[in-house]
Image: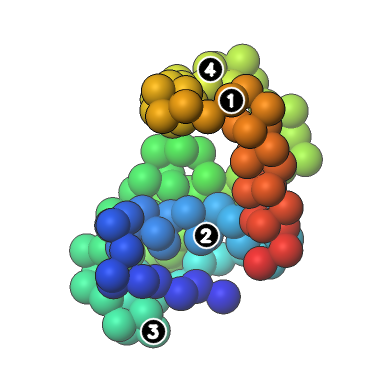
Amino acid sequence: MISLNPESELPLYRQLTNQIMEAIVRDELATNDMLPSVRAFASDLGVNMHTVNKSYHELETKGIIKIVPKKGAIIIANKRQQITAHQLNKLGEAFQPLVVEALVNGISQQELQDLITKVLVKIKED
């Protein structure tokens, strides 16, 4: 399920964060599922505990999980619920620099839309 690439430019904690969110999108993880303990997950992945801890805290900040002391991390994201205006605004703010970078590098609006469609399909297929 989770496969981290130490050669990637993307930090390991960010790879882990992204892959957990992708697993939720693909219904491999669901609301109320427990994630492994930081120690166990780090051991399974062969990474430092701080990597998993940083990923969990990022997911908690995004409202994807809730960290319960002495219990672990629980998926609280519910992809079937309506997104709030605040959440949509935050996503737009995060997405804007990527769109600007693509436009500065000469990608057309159609190519950008095609790229987004391709990414969505890839996420659901993986």
For numbered disc 1, what is the local secondary structure?
A: loop
Q: Amino acid at mark 2?
A: Ile
Q: Is residue 59 above or below residue 43?
A: above
Q: Nearer the viewer, mark 1 or mark 3?
A: 1
Mark 3 or mark 2: which comes first in sequence? 2
Comes first in the chain, label 4 or label 1: 4
Label 3 sits on a secondary structure element that is helix
122 versus 98 height, above or below: below
Q: CA distance from mark 3 to mark 2?
A: 15 Å
Residue at 32%, 63% (x, y): give it: 8
Circle on res. 89:
4
Can you say whether 40 is above or below 124 in the image? below
Which mark is in front, 1 or 2?
1
Q: Residue at x 47, y 27 (%)?
A: 106
Residue on which the image places disc 2: 20
Q: Nearer the viewer, residue 40 or 125?
A: 125
On the image, the x and y values in percent for residue 56 come to: 38, 55
Disc 1 or 2, which lies upstream in sequence?
A: 2
Q: Which residue is mark 3?
A: 44
Q: Quadrant of the N terminus?
A: bottom right
